[in-house]
Every structure is written in C-alpha cells, then in structure tokens.
C-alpha cells in the first residue's frame, strides 16, 4: 500500500492536466491510466480524426478532375496507400502522447498503468498486468484528494453491438482496408466528420439521422452548406428515419420514417456514431453514491462532488463533452486542491464540427438569444464577399453575430466555412470580455484574412455594412 496527496483516475485531457497542475504546486500526485496517456482525445478521438480529415481532403483534391485543374494545376491520378496514411496518423498520435508523458514526468507526477477500482473516497486498488506473462498484481493507494477523470465511451445501440461489421469511431479511425460501402448511424459531428472522410477516400457512404437534418443541435442556416457538401460527395442522406431492427452479422438495417414507411439498407460496414456515454459508473465509482445529474456526476463551480475531497472533471460531469472544457475544469479543480480560489464559470465554450466546410458555434444561437433577451440583433456576412476565402477557393458559408439590441453586447458567434475553427478563440474572447458590436467593428483586422468577416458582420448588425 502507498499513499499520496492527490490521486487522479484517468489520463485524458482532464486527468493529465489536473495531475500536472497539482504536481507543479508541490503536491504529491499519482495518475492512474488504463491505456495510454492522452485519453480518447489524443489516441482515438480529436487528434487522429483531424489527421484523417486532412489526409482525406488532400487525396480528394487530387482526384477531382475540376479541382486543381481550374487553377491550372494538372496532376496524374493519385494512389491511396491506406496503411501508410494510418501510419502517418499514428505517428502524430505517438508524438503528442510522448509529449504528455514527458510533461507528466517533468512535473513529478507518478504514473501507474493499470485498472483502477475505487473502494471509497480515499482508497483505490490498481491492478497492473504482469510483464512477459507474469500474473497481474494489485496495489492499494490511499489519498487525500481523489480526482475522477474517467472520460466517456462510444454509445452502443442495443440491437447493433460493436463487433464484426459494426464499429465505433475508435475502429473507424484505424481501418486496415477501406470498405466499399458504409452506413453511418448518427448525423452529429462525429458521424458527419467520419462520413466525409470515408466518402472522400472512395467509400460509398449512407448517413442515417433520426432528425430531419444533420447536426440537428444547430440551426438549418449553419448546417445547410455541410449537408449540401455531403450530397456533392455522393453521400446518401437518409433523414427523419429511426432504426427499427439491425442485423450486425449481415450488415443490414431496417429503418422507419415519420410516416411509417420502411426501408432496408445493407453495407460492408456500419459505423455507430450515436453519441458518447460518460464513464461515471465505471471503476467502482457507483459505490461512492455521489449525487448525479442523470448519467453525469454532479459538481459545483470548483468541480467538487457531493463527497468531501472527491472531485470530478471532464466528460463524466456533463455536456458539452469536449476536451477543451475538460482541460479548463482540470485547471479549476487543481487550483482548488492547491488552496487557491477559482471557479469554472465560462461565458462561452466553443463547439466545432470539422467537416467540409467547418462549423463553429460560440455562445447563443439567434433563437436561444431571443428566448433569453427578447429582441436581439443578428447579422451575417458571406464568405463570398471575403477576399481571403476567394483566394482559398472556398467561398461557401458565412460568419454570423448575435447581440443584444439595447446595449449591443455580443451574445454569440456562428460560422460555417473554410478553416473557421481558427476563429473560435476570437469569438470566445469577445464574449468573455463582454465586447460590444462597436468594439469588434472598430478593431483593425488584417487584410486579407477570414477574420475580416467578423468585423463585417458586426458592422452589418450596426447598420453600417461596408462590403455586404
């Protein structure tokens, strides 16, 4: 048995950031991770998916006869080496996870690779596999502060368990070969992103969504360009349909639409992208009898649970289940453990779909803003009027700002277009700083850049449109 001041269960973005920060504060810290440091995000989520999105984009540009040729660039038909592509993606993952390992070591965090079992708020057993076929060993760790950062997992469907033809996003990010056909169940950001990747690489993709459009959490104006692009890529969209029956062995589905009509689909592979579930009842956590909000662990603004000196951060604490939210919570929890006063109370958390085009949402959408503040201002500036977007040959989409009518305080930003994820920091900062439309409109923006669309949208909302 060993003891430590802080024991972090889970080495993803929430866990490793919390561990580094408490260790940097001079507090003895142990981190337990069952697999690789970096968690879902670095190993089987954010990073590998964005690598494949970029690789698929590069390949697709070369295979389109009217793509580069319009700019006078001629190229022979490219060949696709999927093993080499996956190897390149894995190299990025290894570089980043190696960096996390180095950061943990430099901070003085003791890392144990094993399966954690929480016995109570102070005690955790860790089972470590034996090397070279040796039997597993179990060590008990006693701590003063227990930090739960166990993350989330792909949500399965009861009638389509993972295995064989049915895969989650984890397996979809590491294919040994490309299937000729694939059905994607779920039109959220995971299904949309991966559906586009496979379509660009040559797989015949059918995307099934229960709602009447993809990315249903956002309004139709934002999602229409993405939906149109999916159709251009040859993706068949089956919207407003729910799964009635599935045959995992044959790769067959029976769907039913809102009118009761039925349709059968079959494919070589079925990707279930129906969301993620928190690991809030894994590792013996359920035995702590913590206060819960549905499947999520309830925490206060310092990420304290209902049990003294037990903390929870990341996906186990609720939506949005995003790595940057998890890291921000980790900073707060580590500060509180270190005796510093800090609250988790962000004015806005950016959400991004890395599709083609990208979509970013920060703060309130127009309808939500109207519900909360009554009469609001909302204005959009199209990328068709932005010089940088035109030079990138990507003029689809727009930037939209939402603000209060009375004092012009900005409530939200949304954008759909090329590389708009890179605008998310500016969007979020303007809301955190309580900026008004006049502040953005009077800020000098570099020309030519996509960020000029922010200024133009603010000017338009003030009735002072310049280029739109």
Image (tube, rainbow, N blue to C red):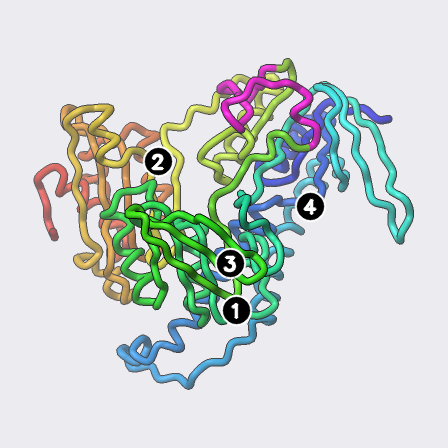
Q: Is residue 30 left or right of residue 337?
A: right
Q: Which residue is mark 4?
A: 101
Lateral position of residue 6 relative to residue 467, left or right: right
Q: CA distance from mark 1 to mark 2?
A: 42 Å
Quadrant of the rendering where the N terminus is positioned: top right
Frontmost of labels 3 and 4 is 3
Q: Toward which corner of the image does residue 21 lie, by quadrant?
A: top right
Most common secondary structure along the magenta stretch: loop
N-terminal-most mark, 1 or 3: 1
Q: Quadrant of residue 391?
A: bottom left
Per the image, the residue denoted by label 3 is 270
Of mark 3 and mark 4, the one earlier in the sequence is 4
Residue 305 on the magenta span: yes
Identify residue for label 1: 179
Which mark is drawn over residue 452? none
Quarter of the view holding residue 287: top right
Q: Is residue 304 magenta?
A: yes
For the residues carrying marks 2 and 3, which lies nearer the camera in this image? Answer: 3
Return the x and y of residue 314 as percentages of the image width and height: 54, 33
Circle 4 residues within 10 Å: few <14, some 14–19, many ≥20: some
Tell which tag, 1 or 2, sits nearer the viewer: 1
Marks 3 and 4, how far apart at CA:
34 Å
In front of the other: 75 or 268 = 268
């Amino acid at each position: 048995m060993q003891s430590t001041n802080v024991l972090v269960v889970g080495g993803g973005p929430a866990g490793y950031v919390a561990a580094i920060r408490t260790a940097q504060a001079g507090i003895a810290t142990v981190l337990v991770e069952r697999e690789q440091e970096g968690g879902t995000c670095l190993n089987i989520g954010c990073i590998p998916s964005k690598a494949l999105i970029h690789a698929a984009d590069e390949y697709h540009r070369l295979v389109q006869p009217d793509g580069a040729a319009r700019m006078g660039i001629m190229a022979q038909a490219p060949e696709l080496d999927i093993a080499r592509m996956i190897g390149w993606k894995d190299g990025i993952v290894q570089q980043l996870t190696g960096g996390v390992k180095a950061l943990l070591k430099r901070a003085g965090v003791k890392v144990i690779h094993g399966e954690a079992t929480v016995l109570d708020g102070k005690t955790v057993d860790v089972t470590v596999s034996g090397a070279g076929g040796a039997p597993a060993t179990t060590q008990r760790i006693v701590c003063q502060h227990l930090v739960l950062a166990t993350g989330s997992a792909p949500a399965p469907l009861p009638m389509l368990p993972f295995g064989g033809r049915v895969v989650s996003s984890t397996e979809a990010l590491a294919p040994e070969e490309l299937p000729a056909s694939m059905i994607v169940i779920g039109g959220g950001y995971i299904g949309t992103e991966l559906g586009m990747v496979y379509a660009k690489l040559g797989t015949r993709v059918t995307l099934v969504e229960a709602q009447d459009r993809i990315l249903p959490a956002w309004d139709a104006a934002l999602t229409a360009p993405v939906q149109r692009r999916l159709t251009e890529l040859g993706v068949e969209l089956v919207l407003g349909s729910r799964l009635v029956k599935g045959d995992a062995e044959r790769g067959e589905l029976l769907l039913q639409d809102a009118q009761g009509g039925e349709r059968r689909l079959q494919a070589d592979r079925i990707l279930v992208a129906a969301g993620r579930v928190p690991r809030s009842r894994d590792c013996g956590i359920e035995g702590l009898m913590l206060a819960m909000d549905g499947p999520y662990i309830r925490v206060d603004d310092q990420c304290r649970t209902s049990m003294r000196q037990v903390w929870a951060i990341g996906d186990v604490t609720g939506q949005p289940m995003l790595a940057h939210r998890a890291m921000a919570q980790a900073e707060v929890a580590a500060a509180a453990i270190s005796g510093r006063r800090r609250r988790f109370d962000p004015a806005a958390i950016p959400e991004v779909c890395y599709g083609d085009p990208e979509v970013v949402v920060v703060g309130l959408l127009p309808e939500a803003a109207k519900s909360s503040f009554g009469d609001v201002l909302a204005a959009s500036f199209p990328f068709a009027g932005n010089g940088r977007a035109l030079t990138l040959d990507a003029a689809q989409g727009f930037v939209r700002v939402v603000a209060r009518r009375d004092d012009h305080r900005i409530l939200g930003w949304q954008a759909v277009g090329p590389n708009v994820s890179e605008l998310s920091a500016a969007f979020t900062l303007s809301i955190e700083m309580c900026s008004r439309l006049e502040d953005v409109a009077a800020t000098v923006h570099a020309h030519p850049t996509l960020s000029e669309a922010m200024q133009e949208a603010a000017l338009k909302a003030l009735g002072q449109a310049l280029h739109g």
